[in-house]
Structures are given as C-alpha cells and as structure tokens.
Amino acid sequence: MERILLLMTAAGWPDAAEAVRSARENAAAPERLTFGLSLREEPDEEGLTAMQAAGGVQFLCPGTDAWSEVEMLWRGEGFILMGHPAMRFTRHWDMHLLHALRRCRREGWNACVLTGYLPRPADPIDAVYPVAAEGFDAEGRLCFHRGTALRYAVSPLRSAFIHPDFCFASAGFFREMAREGEAHPASPLFLRAHRCKWEAYTLHRPLMQMKWDFPLPTVRVDTDEENQQGSLTRFEKRFSLRFREQKLSAMARQGVFTADLSFPVQPSAAVRLQEAAREVRSRRSRVNPLCVTAFLSHPQPEDSLKEEYMSWFARLARLKNLALLAYADGPSVRQLTAIHPNVLEYKRRYGLPVEEDVPASQALDYVRLCKPFLLAQSREKMLGHSHYIWLDFGYLRYPVYEGASLIWNEVCTDKITMASVEGRPDPSMIVMPQQHVLPLSREITALCQTFRGKNDRLPQEEKLWQELIQAHPDMFRLIELPGRRELLTMVLTSREEEFHAHI
C-alpha cells in the first residue's frame, strides 16, 4: 500500500488536531496515513493522549518549519502531503490525490508535484486555483494571487509556482528541496524545484478546503545568483515572465500557460442534468434582461492585460442562456466580433454627455461613468426587455458551464440592484429595471455637471453611486457579498447547491 505522510507546521497540537482528524476520517485507507507535526509548543498530557489516540502521529518540538525538518519527521513513506492546520478533507481524498499524481506522470514526467490555492468558504465556487504572479511590489519582490479557478478541469494543469501550504509529491521531492534549501537558502521554492527538474501541477479537483488562509509571502529573486545556478533563463522562457525587467505575461498572471488562457473542461453529467432541470423551471419567469458590456482600447485599467480581458469576455459570450450586447471602439470591434456576434461600434455620443473634452488623466473615470448611458442606448436599440444589466467587460473570471441556467428573479426586481463589499457599492454589475434607465441617466448627467463645475473634474464612480444611493434609498437594493464581481453568482447555481463529482 502506498503510504502518505501528512506534514504540518502548527503552534501546538490543538491547532493541528482537527486537520488530522479530518484527514483520517475521510481517507479511503486510513491505515496508509501517518502524521508529522512541527510544533512550537510542547503538548500537555491531554494533548499527548489525544495524539496517541489519533494514531500514527509524531511531532518535533520546538519546531520551526516542516519543510526544513522533513528528514527528522520522515519514516520511509513513499509520498508526502505538506498541509496546513486549516485543511479539511473530502471523502476518499487520499485515493483521488494519488490518482491525480499518476495522471501527471502519464504525461511522460515522473518527477511531478501537485499544488495550488485550495478553496475557502468565502469563495464563490468550489475549485482549486493556480498560484499565479500578481505583480512586483515597490521593492521588486514578486507578489502572488489566485489565478484562474480550475473549475470542471479534466486533469491537473501545469504550474510555474508552488503553494507551500499545499504540496503533494513523492518523498524524494521534499527531501531534495530540504537539501537545496540548506545549500541555497535565498532561492525560492519554485526555482529550486525547477532547477532540480520537478514539474509542478495545479490539482484539478477540490479534494481539500481551507477554513482560513493568509496571503502568500512575497519573494525576492536574485537574478544574478539564480543565473549562476543556470536555470533562471529556462524558467523565464518556459513560463513567460522576466524578473529583472519585472514583466509578466497574461499566462503568468492567470497561472494558465496556454495561448488563449483556457484549458479543457468537462462538467459532470450530474451538473449538466441539474442545469437542464433549472432551465426548464426558469422558463416560467417573465423576467427577460439584456446584459450590456463594453471594451474600449483606451484607456485600459492597469490591473490586468488585454489578453486577460478577452479571455474573461469569452466566458461571458459562451453562456448560451445569456442575452449579451457588447460595445467596442474601432480597433476592437473586429476582435470582439470573432468571439461574440452581438457587437456594436461605440460612439462618443453613447456615453456621458460632456461639453468639453475629458483630459487623459480622467479618461478611465469617464468610461466608468458611462455605464448607465450605455444601458440607455441599449434600451433605445432593443426595446422589450424588463431589465438592462451592466456587466464589466472582465466580470466573469472563472469557468462556467456553457449551458448553465440563469434564474434572474433574485436580482431582477423593481429596484436597482447592486452588490456591496464591506459596505461599499460594487458597480461591476448593475441591474436596472427598464423604467429607471432614462431618469437615472438624466440625474447622473446633472450630478456630473455640478461636480465638474465645482471641482474641475469628474466624480469617482464609487462616490457617485454612494451619493445616488443616499439620495434615493428606496430606489436601490444592495446585497452584501464577500468580494467584487460576485452578484452574478446569485443568478447561477450556488456553490452549496451544485452537484460535484470529484472522481
């Protein structure tokens, strides 16, 4: 039987106890599991008794980091899972984890590592996210974030980076990384792994969840030192980034290393059946909204690249049950039309009416203030819809089943519906009953003219919506959600309701 050692760094036994219990209770073969804990605090008598009752638990105290203490905790197990006290495990996780690692090996590479950001309770979907590069901070250190969620992915996906709190591989990987860490302590884990020819993959099924987590620490890459080791250039070419110039590709930012930032997906038969049943029920609704979005070549937000926005828009365009109208300016019309047929050329008169040209420094603010006016323009062109809904061009940032049913009744009411995040309005999605579109556009025009006359500039989008909500509290409905761009989840099958297949 293939034995698995679960390693964790924890303050003490009480912090690790629930993760240990969850792992053992949900394993297909609990007898294959052993546990190694790096504890900062010595367990008391009660803790020692509980550890003994749990079975197969050994600990090191005072410990510092299980990554560097592998040799002291390893007892010949063939595989090691580097875990975290916040982990909670799904049924038969051990069997499926070994199966996923074997799938990576079948691609022709035996030295494979499974990793990724595990889902949290607050996440809108239950999926594993690649560890992706977010950018560089003021001191030149690489920052990480969650890439594209591997929802419905058919197999693990190649990854550039490794999450230190979730990593599964043969024991040889961890022993080699411990030795490399002693020899090159300043070298990041992902570069050590690449130098030793270990291939990282993001797990494609959420076999564990995290009750909580913390941001990954930033990493400084000493390009001169790494070049001496002889692997940095190879890593940069393979994963399309440049450390010295602090440049990242869309692939590195999303953690998906394909030209179109996509990967093979296959929703389970249970999910497809569930969506078909929901679609039948949704036909009874009299709500028929039109969703509107726009992409203008200039200006672009600085937080993402154009390739990312195109991939996000493609996800919206593929939804068969979504009525979607997109606007684009001259250079982008042809590109969008290749993705979605319902595209109109944007003209200046469609936006917020202003008497003078908007300076370049306010161009992005101006574009954001144009959302209600594009809804008004869409209402004029396509009458007969009960609601007009603004969706930011980069709204949908994770895969959704193309045949997903959309039940709008929760957000399409007689009020203007928006999400709020930590008490602040989120205008990435605005649901507007058709009767409110024109009156609200006129009021926004007056507010912007007044503000510009007093301050010689346009108002910030968030500030404008806050003022409107305060002035007309009975006209708006705000739904508090954990993060931005999540209001659409109330239209789709919820995470709690969705059928999952982890095999």
Image (tube, helix red, strand yellow):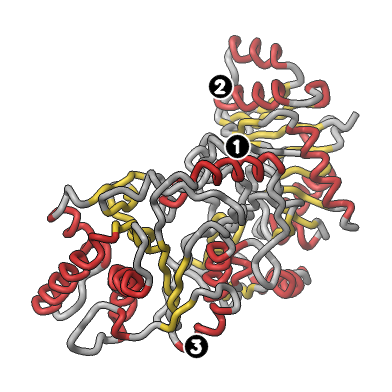
Q: Using the image as rendered, state which of residue 48 and residue 259 is in the foreground.
A: 259
The amino acid type of the residue labelled 1 equals Gln
Instruction: Determine which residue is flagged by label 2.
Output: 14
Q: Residue at x 61, y 31 (%)?
A: 88
Looking at the rendered structure, which numbered label has been put on residue 60?
none
**CA gap, disc 3 to disc 1?**
43 Å
**Picture quarter with the C terminus:** top right
Instruction: Determine which residue is flagged by label 1.
Output: 209
Task: Give the side of residue 356 with respect to residue 319, left or right.
Answer: left
Q: Describe the element under mark 1 as helix, strand or loop.
A: strand
Q: Position of residue 142 (x, y in %)?
A: 56, 64
Number of numbered callouts drawn:
3
Crowd around label 1: few <14 · some 14–19 · many ≥20 (10 Å): some
Mark 1 or 2 closer to N-term?
Answer: 2
Q: Residue at x 33, y 60 (%)?
A: 427
Instruction: Determine which residue is flagged by label 3.
Output: 331
Mark 3 or 1 closer to N-term?
Answer: 1
Q: Residue at x 83, y 30 (%)?
A: 75
Q: Using the image as rendered, state which of residue 85 and residue 103 is in the foreground.
A: 103
